[in-house]
Each structure stands twice: as C-alpha cells, then as structure tokens.
Amino acid sequence: MLPCTAVRLRPLHRRRWLLIFLLASLIFFFSVSGYLEEFLSGILSIFYSTPSHVSSSRVLNVPIPPFLLSPTRACLLPPFLLILVSSAPSHRDRRDAIRQTWGSLPSSTASSSLTLFVLAVPKSPEERAALMHEAVTHRDIIQANFTDTYRNLTLKTITGLTWALEKCRGARFLLKTDDDVFVNTVHLSQFLQRESSLQYMGRLHWHVSPYRDPESRHYVSQEMYGGNYFPPYCSGTGYVLSSEAAALILGQLPSGPWPAVEDVYVGIMAQVAGIAPRHVAKMAGSMSVPHSPCCYRTMFTSHGLTPKGMHEAWKMLKEAEDRWCPSLSMLFCKVFGQLVEKGGEGVH
C-alpha cells in the first residue's frame, strides 16, 4: 500500500506536465503563426533613432531616370492604398491575370485601392512596341528610362515610390509587391484603416548576412554595405509603406549605384531614416500558402502564383466570402506554407 503523500503527488505531477504541454503548445502557436514575431518587431523601435523631417524638395530630387510612361490621370481621385506591382516586360500574362482578379475595377472600388505596374525598358523593339500598346490600352503602367534587368530592381522600386509621391500624393499607403503575388485588397485595406501614419510593414527577415560572392545575383560589396548582417527588413514580395515613411526613406537615398537586393536596401534606408520595420503575420512573404479558400481569405498576400493560379485563387476568394473558416485557418496556412516555401515554385 502506497503512502498517502505519494497518492497526492500523482495529480500534481500530471497537472505540471499538462501545464508544460499547454505552455509549449502556446509558444509553438505564436511562433509558427507569426504573432511572436509581431510582438518582437514591436520593440524594434527602441533601437532606432527618432525619424527626422525631410524636405519635399529633397524627396522630389531623387536621382532616377525620367519617366517614359506615367498614368497621371489614374490618381485624379487618389486611392487610400496605391499598389505598385513590380513586373517584367515579358510578363503580360501575369499583369492581365492581376487586372482580371484582385486588381480589377470591382476589387479596387471595394478596397479603395489602385493597382499600377512598374516596369523599365525592354531590350527588343518588339517588346517595346507591345508594352506601349498595353500602356495605351490599360493606362496602368509606370515606366522610366532604364534597362529592365535584375540588377536594376532597386531602381525599379525607387522609381515606383518616387512616382507615387510625385503623381499620387493623396494615397495614404503604398504596397510594393510582385506580379506573382495574390493580394486580398479588401482585407488588407480594412487592416490599414486602423494604422497610424508612419508604417513600414510586411514579413520580416532577421539576421540575414550579405552575399559576398561576385557571381551571385544577390551580391553586395563591402563598399555598398560593410556590416556582417543586414538590419531587419520586409520581404520584397509584399510590404506596405505609409506615404510619410516612403518620403523619409527616399529622402535618405545616396546618388547610387544601389545594390540589386531592393527589399534589403529599403530596410537599410528605413533604418537610416529611423523607421523600424513591423512584422505582419498575414503577409506571406516568399511563402506559397496552401491553395485553399480560407487561406486566400485569411492572408493579406500569397506568393508564387501563376496566372492560372491567380484566377483560381480569385474564384476561391469570391466563394469564401460567405463561407465559415476555422479560427485556426492562419496557423494551417502558415505551417503548410513554410513546409513548401523552399521547394517548388508555388501554385500552378
């Protein structure tokens, strides 16, 4: 027969292990879902200097080539959210898919957003002629006079931000994204309605080292950035800047040349400007979330979609408007999204 003390200890022992299990589950949930990173990014501002005012003349004198295409009438009624899609000249099918889905007029009206495409100059005369015809037809293309190459990605982003501040001054927020990203514009706009005027937010990357191999397309020389690690920055697949934050960042730009890793460089300039990045769990970054209605309804962005996948996602989102989605939908989307993030090219 066991002593009475041993009998009393067993329930205490079980409760202790139950508490440990619950605590571990809670930590796992907050870590995988991204809420832990949201909390940690909230204290980054402690390590950043106080943002200082930048004169409008300095912002408007950003050293970029002249605009060749400028849909200025698109901003006669400035949107709440201006979406700048970085695209390549040969990606007409991707741009058309966006125009027919989340960048369509009904979606733009519902979310008070405007979607424009940012490109540079194609190499072939045939592509130049085709792009000109496309611009005349849709009036949604921003183009500046430089060659459309990977090494000019940073210049392309800066071109889009500069155009926004010059030609679309009433836009409160800017979303920089890519042409293989699905955006839930309504959900994102509703979220931004509650945000303050100084914001730089997306999926945060921490403790990333520069590539020092000159053969890598991500190469960053010691002259361009001498540190061992980049400051925290938001994934270039989709990040939001308030117009005030964009102006402060552009006001810090040196004359160039600028490294090709545009999202990293925006993060560096944000640090110089005193703007701490903020992690948003519903921004997928480079993740390709599961191809399911609740994921497209829950997440603000989803990466890696082909034109066919874009149309399928749009149909799913429309069908999910009146559909009940479990409260743990985002956890499902993030867990399975991270499993496939490093393999494959996304939804086909």
Image (tube, rainbow, N blue to C red):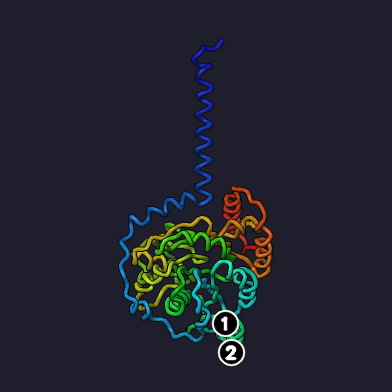
Rendered image: mark on residue 264: none
**Foreground of the two, 111 or 203:** 111
Please report the residue visible at 36 percent of the width from the left and 70 percent of the height from the top.
Answer: 248
Q: Is residue 20 above or below residue 2?
A: below
Pick out the residue farthest to the front. 77
Q: Which residue lies at the image location 49% right of the left edge and 43% below the top edge?
A: 27
Which numbered mark, 2 or 1, is in the foreground of this view?
A: 1
Closer-to-camera residue (4/248): 248
- Checking the image for residue 125, the label placed there is 2
Q: Position of residue 249 (x, y in %)?
A: 38, 70
Quarter location, residue 227: bottom left
SS for dot 1:
loop
> Is 96 drawn above or below residue 193 in the view shown?
below
Residue 49 image point, x, y percent: 31, 61
Secondary structure at badge 2 equals helix
Q: CA distance from mark 2 to mark 1?
A: 20 Å
Mark 2, Cα crowd under 10 Å, few <14 / some 14-19 / many 20+, is few
Work out whether 46 lies above or below 171: above
Toward which corner of the image does residue 180 lie, by quadrant?
A: bottom right
Q: Is residue 292 visible?
A: no
State which quarter of the image contains the N terminus: top right
Q: In the figure, is residue 56 to the left or right of 189? A: left
Amino acid type of the residue that numbered disc 2 sits on in the rendered structure? Pro
Q: Residues within 10 Å of mark 1 (few under 14, many from 20)?
A: some
The spot of residue 212 in percent (x, y) is 42, 67
- Whichever of labels 2 and 1 marks the residue nearer the N terminus, that label is 2
Report whether residue 333 is seen: yes
Looking at numbered disc 1 in the image, what kind of residue is underneath it?
Arg
Residue assigned mark 1: 139
The C terminus: image quadrant: bottom right
Which residue does the image show at 43% across and 63% down from the upper left?
A: 200
